């Protein structure tokens, strides 16, 4: 397994109390967030994997009180979050998996609180890129190649309450 990661700002908040969260993540224009992997793999009895991930801003909030209030601001002004994979994979007995992911802003919140006001603002002024160059041959199992570039993404999960 070959893996590379790069990140600008990351936060993970988990509480079991009434929670008010103010999150501000800003990556300025002079920065670059790059994750690059160059690797050759051959004659592998099991499986082979190559992964590259770059995230400009990432926030996750998980709470289980009566009230959860979240105000999140994410701004990515970097030249990029970018990923690049260059690989040659051959002679693998199992599976061969190559995954590349670049994300500018990612926000996730989950709670079972009765009240859950959320304000989320995401601004992406970056060039978000994900590139995979792969030569794959003689693989005994499955082969999967994935490349994703995402500007802004958000997920809010509000579990049912009685």
Image (tube, rainbow, N blue to C red):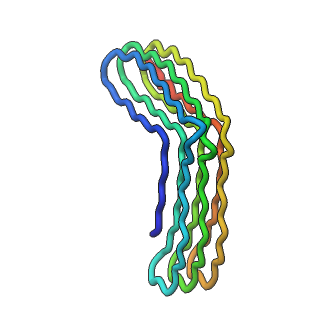
In this view, which residue lies farthest toward the front? 30
Q: Nearer the viewer, residue 117 or 81?
A: 81
Q: Nearer the viewer, residue 141 or 59?
A: 59
At horizontal 42% and vertical 17% (from top left) the residue drawn is 68
On the image, which quarter does residue 104 sit in?
top right
- Residue 140 is situated, as x and y percent measured from the top left of the image, at 56, 82
Work out which quarter of the rendered image holds the N terminus and state it.
Answer: bottom left
Query: Is residue 129 visible to the viewer in this orientation of the structure?
Result: yes
Answer with left or right where residue 144 lies relative to residue 49. right
**Position of 139 relative to 6 (above/below):** below
**Position of 103 relative to 99 (above/below):** above
- Residue 134 is situated, as x and y percent measured from the top left of the image, at 65, 72
Work out which quarter of the rendered image holds the C terminus and state it.
Answer: top left
At horizontal 56% and vertical 67% (from top left) the residue drawn is 97
- Residue 54 is situated, as x and y percent measured from the top left of the image, at 54, 50
At horizontal 47% and vertical 19% (from top left) the residue drawn is 70
Q: Nearer the viewer, residue 97 or 159?
A: 97
**Position of 104 relative to 158 (above/below):** below
Q: Nearer the viewer, residue 124 or 136?
A: 124
Query: Is residue 162 visible to the viewer in this orientation of the structure?
Result: no
In this view, which residue lies farthest toward the left? 16
């Amino acid at each position: 397994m070959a893996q590379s990661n790069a990140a600008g700002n990351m936060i993970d908040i988990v509480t079991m109390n009434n929670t008010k969260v103010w999150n501000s993540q800003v990556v300025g224009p002079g920065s670059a967030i790059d994750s690059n992997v160059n690797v050759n793999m051959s004659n592998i009895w099991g499986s082979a994997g190559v992964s590259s991930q770059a995230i400009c801003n990432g926030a996750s909030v998980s709470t289980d009180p009566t009230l959860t209030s979240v105000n999140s601001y994410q701004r990515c002004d970097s030249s990029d979050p970018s990923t690049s994979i260059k690989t040659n994979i051959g002679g693998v007995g199992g599976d061969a998996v190559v995954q590349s992911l670049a994300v500018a802003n990612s926000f996730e919140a989950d709670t079972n609180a009765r009240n859950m006001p959320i304000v989320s603002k995401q601004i992406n002024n970056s060039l978000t890129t994900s590139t995979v160059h792969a030569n794959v041959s003689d693989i005994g199992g499955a082969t999967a190649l994935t490349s994703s570039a995402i500007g802004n993404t958000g997920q809010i999960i509000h579990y049912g309450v009685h």
